[in-house]
Each structure stands twice: as structure tokens, then as C-alpha cells.
Image: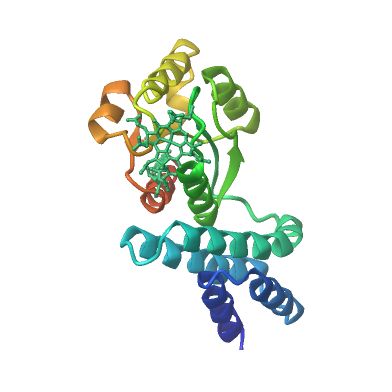
């Protein structure tokens, strides 16, 4: 019975049907199913399936966005229960598009996938300067700093953020991840980032593995 409803949650999430997901999460809680099981086996598992399809070009940005909206609808219902039982997030990540850059679609996808992987996300938006990245990461006690850039003119600013982290003696405290269409793994290596990933799904997988390695 529990397996059936959890499977349905995952299926509706993959179809992006927020109302169905919300109703089923409520029903699952009424049935006394463990909120963690609903989160991990229903919502997050469904989002990982969507992520895999996105990576293989079987679904595209609009499908991922509606699935993420359905995931958020479910998580909103679960959140008070998870707080009650003290469900710890996997880690905390600050994410933003760097200074001078207003593109946010890819950054939002990365944020959603990280959330789907179990991270608490502090989304700083677009046009984010080094001081803000660092101040917010420090304030939140973040584990990961994620930077996105879509312009060849703004991607060098990622190095400014890493330089500022070094100047403050904070570089080793954080896993620094970079991405965005013009960014490459060579560039990431040159500027001293820890990881470059080409897509949002891989970013979530890599962040998860990096945190597991640190703990
Ligand atoms: Co702009 N734009 N744009 N634009 N725009 C590009 C990037 C461009 C390639 C178009 C072109 O000329 N062919 C070009 C850049 C050229 C260059 O630098 N070489 C360009 C330009 C020039 C500009 C303006 C300068 C145009 C102008 O005003 N003259 C201007 C700049 C504004 C600014 O930022 N200061 C501008 C403005 C805009 C809009 C506002 C109109 C709009 C943005 C809307 C928004 O984001 N809310 C826009 C758009 C939509 C695009 C294109 C068409 C699409 C970008 C996008 O959202 N892609 C783009 C052309 C293109 O890429 N085909 C273009 C979909 C998204 C899912 O992909 O962001 O790459 P992407 O994210 C991917 C991966 O890169 C990765 O995961 C995602 C998917 O899995 N990823 C990460 C992203 N961040 C990551 C971080 C990670 C890991 C992975 O770790 C932390």
C-alpha cells in the first residue's frame, strides 16, 4: 500500500502534476507513511528520473520546470513534518549567476536538481558579486558555492570570487562548482574551481559525491 502511493507520487511528479502530487502526499501522511520515505522514495526519486531523462535529451527544460514545481508542491506539505522529526539536509549550497550576468534558467535548473538531491538551497539570484557569494555562504554555513555564467564576458568573474575566497582564507572551507554554456573543465581548472559540470543533473550528482567525500 505504502509502496503503491509512493510510486504514484513519483509518477505524477514526473508528469509535472503538482495538484496530484500535493493530494497524494497529504494522503500518504494521513496513512501514517514516514515523511522521509515520501521525500526520498517518492519526490526525490521522481525528480532524479526526470534529471536522467533531461541528461539524455528525452525531456527538455519545460518538462523539468513543471516537474520541479510539482516537487516543490509536495515538499511544502512535507516540510513541517520533516522539521518536527529533524530531517537534516544533505548539505547547504549557495547558488547564483555571477556579476554582470542576468541569465537564470540554467542556474534555476541546477538549484532544483540540487534541491532534488537533498540539498538546502540559498538562491542568490543573478548579478551576484563576490562579497555577496561569500557573505551568504558564511551566514548560511554552506558547504557548496555554485556559480553559473552564460556570457564569455562574465565567466572570468568566477575567478574573482575564488580569488576573494583565497584572500579571506576561506577557499578550503567550500566545494566550489562552476557551470554554464561557455564554461569548460579546462577553464574551471585554470581558475581553481573544484568541479565543472556541463548539466544540472550531473551538478547534483557531483555535489552529492563531493559532500559524501568530505564527511
Ligand atoms: Co542571452 N545570450 N543575452 N539572454 N541568451 C546567450 C547566452 C547567447 C549565447 C546568445 C547568442 O548570442 N547566441 C549570448 C552570449 C554570447 C557569448 O557570451 N559568447 C547572449 C547574449 C549576448 C546576451 C545579451 C548580451 C544580449 C544583449 O542584450 N545584447 C544579454 C545579456 C544580459 C546580461 O546577462 N547582462 C542577454 C539577455 C538574454 C535574455 C534576458 C533575453 C534571456 C535570459 C532570460 C533568463 O535567463 N531569465 C537570454 C537567453 C534566454 C539566452 C539564450 C537564448 C538561452 C540561455 C538559456 O537559458 N539556455 C542563450 C543562447 C543559448 O544558450 N542557446 C543566450 C537554457 C539553459 C537551460 O541552459 O543556462 O546553459 P544553460 O544551463 C545549462 C548548462 O549550462 C548547465 O546546466 C543547464 C542545463 O542542465 N549549467 C550549470 C548552468 N549553470 C550551471 C552551473 C553549474 C553546473 C552546470 O554548477 C554550479
Residue at the spot 61% in from the left edge and 60% down from the top edge: 69
Up-down relation of residue 48 to residue 176 (above or below): below
Seen as rendered, the residue at the extreme left is 186
In the image, 28: left or right of 109? right
In the image, 101: left or right of 32? left
Residue at the spot 73% in from the left edge and 64% down from the top edge: 77
Up-down relation of residue 37 to residue 184 (above or below): below
Coordinates of residue 175 in the picture (x, y in percent) = 43, 33
Residue at the spot 38% in from the left edge and 38% down from the top edge: 180
Quarter-of-image position of residue 56: bottom left
Coordinates of residue 139 in the picture (x, y in percent) = 65, 27
Residue at the spot 49% in from the left edge and 45% down from the top edge: 105
Quadrant for the N terminus in the image: bottom right
Residue nearest the viewer, comparing 35 with 10: 10
In the image, 65: left or right of 59? right
Up-down relation of residue 176 to residue 121 (above or below): above
What count of labels does the image hold?
0
Quarter-of-image position of residue 179: top left
Q: How is the image coloured?
A: rainbow
Coordinates of residue 104 in the picture (x, y in percent) = 51, 40
Up-down relation of residue 152 to residue 184 (above or below): above
Ligand 1 placement by image quarter: top left
Residue nearest the viewer, comparing 95 with 143: 95
Coordinates of residue 186 in the picture (x, y in percent) = 23, 30
In the image, 42: left or right of 207? right
Seen as rendered, the residue at the extreme top is 167
Amino acid at each position: 500500500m505504502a509502496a503503491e502511493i509512493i510510486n504514484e507520487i513519483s509518477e505524477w511528479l514526473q508528469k509535472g502534476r503538482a495538484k496530484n502530487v500535493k493530494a497524494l502526499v497529504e494522503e500518504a501522511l494521513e496513512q501514517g507513511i514516514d515523511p522521509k520515505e515520501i521525500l526520498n522514495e517518492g519526490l526525490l526519486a521522481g525528480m532524479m528520473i526526470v534529471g536522467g531523462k533531461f541528461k539524455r535529451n528525452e525531456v527538455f527544460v519545460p518538462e523539468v520546470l513543471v516537474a520541479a514545481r510539482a516537487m516543490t508542491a509536495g515538499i511544502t506539505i512535507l516540510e513541517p513534518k520533516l522539521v518536527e522529526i529533524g530531517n537534516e539536509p544533505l548539505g547547504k549550497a549557495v547558488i547564483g549567476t555571477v556579476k554582470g550576468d542576468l541569465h537564470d534558467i540554467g542556474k534555476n535548473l541546477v538549484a532544483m536538481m540540487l534541491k532534488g538531491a537533498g540539498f538546502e538551497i540559498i538562491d542568490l539570484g543573478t548579478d551576484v558579486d563576490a562579497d555577496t557569494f561569500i557573505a551568504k555562504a558564511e551566514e548560511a554555513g554552506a558547504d557548496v558555492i555554485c556559480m553559473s555564467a552564460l556570457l564569455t564576458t562574465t565567466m572570468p568573474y568566477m575567478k574573482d570570487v575564488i580569488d576573494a575566497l583565497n584572500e579571506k582564507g576561506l577557499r578550503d572551507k567550500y566545494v566550489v562548482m562552476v557551470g554554464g554554456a561557455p564554461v569548460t573543465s579546462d577553464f574551471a581548472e585554470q581558475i581553481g574551481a573544484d568541479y565543472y559540470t556541463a548539466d544540472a543533473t550531473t551538478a547534483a550528482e557531483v555535489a552529492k559525491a563531493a559532500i559524501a567525500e568530505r564527511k
